[in-house]
Image: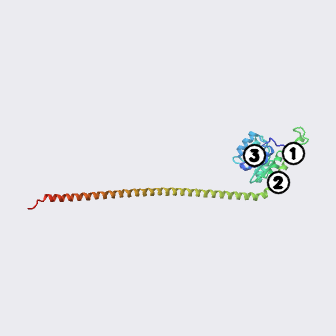
């Protein structure tokens, strides 16, 4: 099947799935790959680029995958599409096939399943055999038979999906439980990281307080040393003044003694 130059639009929220489909399946086959991470962006790109094939996740954000296809059908676009989903249901599969889905694949995707679905999706539609002019009874009967065959084919695809869904249901439940536990652990890690950050902030506050207290103690010690030096200097100055005062008092005493001797008249 010639696929060089064909355009495929992948509408999928998870980047790793887009990379897997683009690098391992479509680009090696020569497809031009278009991508969208939500339903509204996918609808807009489908209308602008008119791709040859669409792969759409049923649970993309902003607009459900089946709503994207239904909108395209209302606008007259009949682009073949392949539906993919993590948690499938019979109702979603029925809706997908009613909108003309060529296949309905469950995640995790298998490269073999995807390639088989691509081949089926791009297979040319057979023209009704021996059709008479439009409007004739035989032409209408042939179209009815073709429609019945298409419905039967889709019913077979639905049965195959239901058969595959049964063993995968337990896996789906396990994945749900695992995701719930993962989210729980993630929340717990977030809480613990918050506590660690809070402890870091408290430790930083204590460190800053200890640093400020140390600086205060050092400043007080320096002030005490300065005051001690000032006191020692004052004591020294008082001692000097005291010595001077003592000497001055002695001098006054001597002068007073001499004055007494001079003032006393000699006897005789």
Q: Is residue 69 left or right of residue 233?
A: right
Provide the residue designation for mark 3: 10
Question: Which residue, as the protein is rendered here, is positioned at the far bottom?
Answer: 268
On-image quarter of the C terminus:
bottom left
- Asked which secondary structure carries label 2, the reply is helix
- The numbered dot on residue 146 is 1
Q: Nearer the viewer, residue 39 or 227?
A: 227
Q: Of marks 1 and 2, which one's residue comes earlier in the chain? A: 1
Relative to 125, 171 lies left or right:
left
Can you see residue 15?
yes
**Where residue 168 appears, x then y in whole percent?**
77, 57
156, 257: nearer the viewer: 257
The residue under the point 86% across, 48% down is 149
What x and y, as percent, mark residue 224?
40, 58
Q: Is residue 99 visible?
A: no
Circles 1 and 2: CB distance less than 8 Å? no
Q: Residue furthest top?
A: 133
Residue 49 x, y percent position in the rendering: 75, 40
Q: Which mark is residue 12?
A: none
Q: Residue at x 13, y 58 (%)?
A: 263
Q: Quadrant of the N terminus?
A: top right
Q: Disc 2 designates what residue?
A: 160
Secondary structure under tag 1 reads helix
- Residue 6, position as x, y percentages in the image: 80, 42
Question: Judging from the image, what secondary structure is the residue with disc 3 in?
Answer: strand
Q: Give the alpha-carbon distance from disc 1 to disc 2, as whole Å.
A: 21 Å
């Amino acid at each position: 099947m010639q696929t060089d130059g064909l355009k495929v639009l992948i509408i999928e929220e998870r980047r790793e799935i887009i990379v897997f489909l683009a690098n391992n399946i479509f680009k090696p086959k020569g497809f031009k790959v278009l991508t969208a991470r939500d339903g509204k962006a996918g609808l807009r790109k489908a209308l602008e680029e008119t791709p040859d094939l669409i792969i759409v996740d049923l649970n993309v954000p902003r607009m459900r995958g089946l709503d994207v296809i239904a909108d395209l059908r209302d606008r007259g676009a009949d682009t073949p599409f392949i539906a993919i989903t993590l948690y499938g249901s019979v109702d979603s599969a029925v809706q997908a096939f009613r909108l003309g889905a060529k296949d309905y694949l469950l995640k995790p995707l298998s490269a073999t399943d995807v390639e088989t679905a691509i081949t089926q999706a791009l297979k040319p539609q057979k023209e009704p055999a021996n059709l008479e002019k439009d409007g004739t009874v035989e032409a209408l009967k042939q179209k009815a038979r073709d429609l019945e065959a298409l419905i039967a084919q889709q019913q077979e695809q639905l049965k195959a999906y239901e058969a595959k869904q049964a063993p995968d249901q337990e896996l789906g439940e396990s994945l749900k439980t695992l995701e719930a536990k993962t989210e729980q652990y993630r929340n717990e890690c977030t809480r613990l990281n918050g506590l660690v950050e809070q402890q870091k902030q408290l430790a930083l506050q204590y460190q800053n307080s200890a640093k400020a207290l140390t600086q205060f103690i050092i400043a007080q010690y320096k002030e005490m040393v300065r005051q001690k030096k000032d006191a020692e200097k004052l004591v020294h100055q008082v001692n000097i003044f005291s010595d001077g005062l003592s000497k001055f008092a002695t001098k006054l005493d001597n002068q007073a003694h001499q004055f007494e001797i001079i003032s006393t008249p000699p006897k005789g």
